[in-house]
Amino acid sequence: MIGKCKAIAHGSTALDYIFREGKLGNRLAFHNLCSRESKAIYEEMKLVSDYNTRCRNKFLRIEIGIAPQDEKKLSVSELAQIAHLFAKKMGLDNHQWVAVTHKDTDNRHIHIIANRISLYGEVYDTTFVSNKAARITEEISREKGLTIAKEVKIKRKHQKAKANPTREETKRELQRICYDLLEKYKRTGITGHSMFLYELNKHGVTIDRMKNKQSKVYGLKFSYGEYAFKASEVGREFGYRSLQKNFEASRKAETNVSDQVIRKSSENTDTMETGYQLVPPSRSYSPRPTEEVPQIAKAVSEVSDAVISAADEIVEELGEMISPSSHSEDYAEAAWQRKLRYQANRKKKRGRGL
């Protein structure tokens, strides 16, 4: 058996549910209650629960599941005994509760609706109440020699699910195709990625992107033959992110190669530019290094500086004499043009080393 317990506020709805036609099996027990119908039972419980105004969840909903192999062993009277024993171990002697069985599922189960407020106005403590219910059902199962749910779960955990042999064979064939093509086109860039998808399509394998509600891709689905497989079933390398990384690495390699080619071409152009001269070496003139050349150049530079400074002074005096306030704009413009021509000639002379 397995037991669950939870504190609820909608006691009327819960009572209507357990007494609903088509679900109700047997009425097992009515504890501290006079009525036998859902509405009348709720009114009785409400009279007691209204004494406590601070508690919100004033009802307990309890479910006890019976294992299929134990259903034939247990009669209605034995199920009623289990309900009474469970309520006593849970500490519900001074509370109102009702227990029934349901037949709407394959496995028979017991429903108990209890008033959380006792006949003395005390509130039932629901701290870890679900764990408490599970522990008590386990104790009762051991006492009665019934199946314990925890042990069944442990057995199922270590049992492998029965696989479809045809599907497994198809999966192995799909894995062989995918790994062969990945090995063939791995690290070959975008072209290899396109060829990988093309070859898969030729072998009858289709890949669909799985998207969430936000239209974001979270995985891949491989379809081959009559079956569909998640990417994780095919292999780690075929997940959405993993498959991208297999080709991203090759893209980086391609960019590195292209960068190297660009660097080599730029180096070649640099060497060509440095080696190329407007005047061939045979025709270019270079003065012979003598001791007289520096002295001559120094004297020429001094003379040129003196001439240039004197010319500047003359131009400045002319600029002051020819001002826009005393003459027309034409004279000022002519003086400005002369000054610009003089400065240009001066720069040319400096460039020649005169």
Image (spheres, helix red, strand yellow):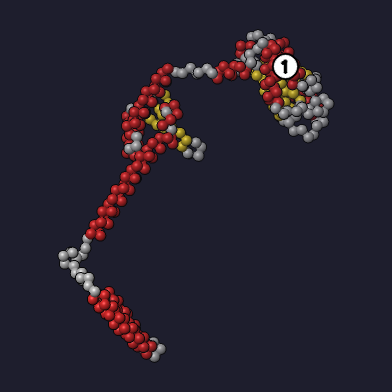
In-image side of 46 versus 322 (left or right)? right
Q: Nearer the viewer, residue 338 or 324?
A: 338
> Residue 110, image x and y in percent?
68, 18
Residue extending furthest toward the front:
291
**Quadrant of the image containing the C terminus:** bottom left
Please identify the quarter of the rendering in which residue 239 is found: top left
> Residue 29, image x and y in percent?
75, 16
Question: Mark 1 highlights which residue?
Answer: 83
Q: In what element is the residue under mark 1?
A: helix
Tally of marks = 1
> Residue 221, image x and y in percent?
43, 30
Q: Which residue sits at x=78%, y=29%?
A: 123
Q: Nearer the viewer, residue 72 or 337?
A: 337
In-image side of 73 versus 274 (left or right)? right
Residue extending furthest toward the right:
120
Q: Which residue sits at x=47%, y=35%?
A: 218
Please identify the quarter of the rendering in which residue 118 is found: top right
Q: Is residue 335 visible?
A: no
Please identify the quarter of the rendering in which residue 269 is found: bottom left
Q: Amino acid at mark 1?
A: Ala
Q: Which residue sits at x=36%, y=25%?
A: 176
Residue extending furthest toward the left:
282
Q: Which residue sits at x=28%, y=78%?
A: 298
Q: Is residue 190 above or below residue 296?
A: above
The residue carrying pointer 1 sits among few (fewer than 14), some (14 to 19) or many (20 or more) residues within 10 Å by Cα, namely: many
**Quadrant of the image containing the N terminus:** top right
Q: Is residue 325 visible?
A: yes
In-image side of 213 versus 74 (left or right)? left
